[in-house]
Image (spheres, helix red, strand yellow):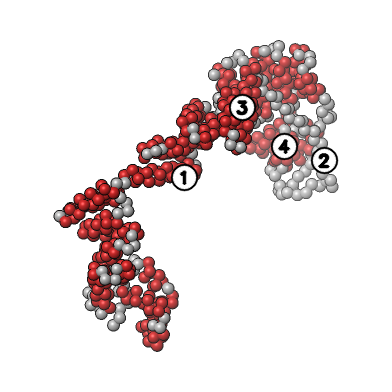
Amino acid sequence: MAEEAKSKGNAAFSSGDYAAAITHFTEAINLSPTNHILYSNRSAAYASLHCYAEALSDAKKTVELKPDWAKGYSRLGAAYMGLSQYKEAADAYKKGLEVDPSNETLKSGLADASRPRGPSSNPFVEAFQGEEMWAKLTADPGTRVYLQQPDFVKTMQEIQKNPNNLNLYMKDKRVMQALGVLFSVKFGGAKGEDTEMKEAEPVKKVEPEPEPEPEPEPMELTEEEREKKERKEEAKKEKEQGNAAYKKKEFEKAIEHYSKAMELDDEDISYLTNRAAVYLEMGKYEECIQDCDKAVERGRELRFDFKMIAKALTRKGSALVKMAKCTKDFEPAIETFQKALTEHRNPDTLKKLNDAEKAKKELEQQEYFDPKVAEEERDKGNGFFKEQKYPEAVRHYSEAIKRNPKDVRAYSNRAACYTKLGALPEGLKDAEKCIELDSSFTKGYSRKGAIQFFMKEYDKAMDTYQEGLNHDPKNQELLDGVRRCVEQINKANRGDLTPEELKERQAKAMQDPEVQNILSDPVMRQVLVDFQENPKAAQEHMKNPMVMNKIQKLVSAGIVQVR
């Protein structure tokens, strides 16, 4: 368990996620508290985050556990360097060289720690050092009151730790006043207003040259870890060669490379999903499914990215679709696509699911298709219709339609049943299906016209009957339908409707999109006004066939009445 946590820490450190590296190394230390390498690695991670005090603590522990290990002194020296304790750093590097006199890292560290670092005294830096700063601020009446303010005290402590950060607090008038006290320079007027400095030229601060941050040293790897890293690199190369072979459609070579990659590194499921893609392309669907199942299982063990799990499931679903020969075979494919979508909602997977469901439905219809059974069911429906058992008749007509979806007679008969049951929208839909399947089937027009008549859409019913007469001019049922529509329309035109009938008819007409468009047309609104107020203009409008057709539509709908 400690080795696993250490490996995760090394990986996080290599990727630059030092905080995660510290977490993993801490976990490993809790499991193996005497392992000096773990403290050394955590020290490097702390140093990378500039947490040099923590880095120093871990470096000391490393040297304590393994005093004859040169790397520990290197960590110790780096931590001291980060804390600007150069003498202690030099001593650490010297002790390390006693253990390993030829170690180049220790030699370089010692040279860096021993090099001169500017003048021994810097007035700018010294002004903020030690108790003298607090004494000056306490002695001055203007800054003494600030020392009662916790945020001011904290700010001055931060500046005392690192005077180079003074520019971060220059907007604080209290800090500026304290700066004047420390350098014996007056800032601001009597009331504290901001004024310019009295000196002609500001004194330039002599700042020490910033020290370079110590570079974190690479993690200490065991022989096993080095071999594992090399295998992973080699596996990636095999994958790249496999990808290249796949693009060239050299499938056998691609499989060979992906298989080698899997042997080298069993912690990357992309090698499995890529090989599954090759098997899918080759038509080896069983092998594809096996690889996808392995990828999902291994991916869950390794807590792999959910998108990769979804990819494996989608690929498996594609293989199952290719293998499907009957409707039942589509069920596992659809279920697999649905599982993939719960992992990651990908548009490609969603399309594959929709296609599979559509293919299953079409296959169901093909498997269920049986014209002979359809005719038997229609005959049963006819028997129930004659007995006025319309719900039973609908059930048998529906079965007949499932057995033969192109039988116009079954749709026509079911439309008649729906009409008897008062289910006019359903009946209208069946009548329209009749006409869609066979535009010369006049019974479909008579069914549709009758339903529209019952719905009191007389103008629409009239159009339907006339359309049917185009196919069969002498059809008596259609001619009777036209006559009934004319009677109703004329009745409205004569004003023979009761107020309730007129109101009902107008309300129904207002739901008609065509009527709504006519009434919302500014030109037609003006025409209607002219018909009431300007007879001469109305006569001119009547010469326009398009306008007259719209007027006739409004008359038929009961919106406009002719007296």
Nearest to N terminus: mark 1 or mark 2: 2
Quick one: SS at disc 2? loop
> Where does the image place residue 117, in percent across and percent down from the top left?
82, 28
- The residue closer to the viewer here, 326 or 425, is 326
User: 451 above or below 37?
Assistant: below
Q: Which image quadrant for residue 491?
A: bottom left
How far apart in space, not on screen, are marks 1 and 2 (Cα)? 70 Å
The three-letter amino acid code for the residue at tag 3 is Ala
How far apart in space, not on screen, are marks 2 and 3 (Cα)? 59 Å
Quick one: SS at disc 1? helix
The three-letter amino acid code for the residue at tag 4 is Asn
Nearest to N terminus: mark 3 or mark 4: 4
What residue is shown with label 1?
A: 351
How far apart in space, not on screen, are marks 1 and 3 (Cα)? 33 Å
Nearest to N terminus: mark 1 or mark 4: 4
What residue is shown with label 3?
A: 235
> Where does the image place residue 393, in percent across and percent down from the top left?
21, 52
The three-letter amino acid code for the residue at tag 1 is Lys
User: 228 above or below 534?
Assistant: above
**Picture quarter with the N terminus:** top right
**Picture quarter with the C terminus:** bottom left
Q: Most extreme residue toward the front, as rendered?
A: 372
Label 1 packing within 10 angstroms: few (<14), some (14-19), many (20+): few
> Where does the image place residue 208, in percent across and percent down from the top left?
80, 33
What residue is shown with label 2?
A: 204
From the image, state whether disc 2 or disc 3 is nearer to you: 3
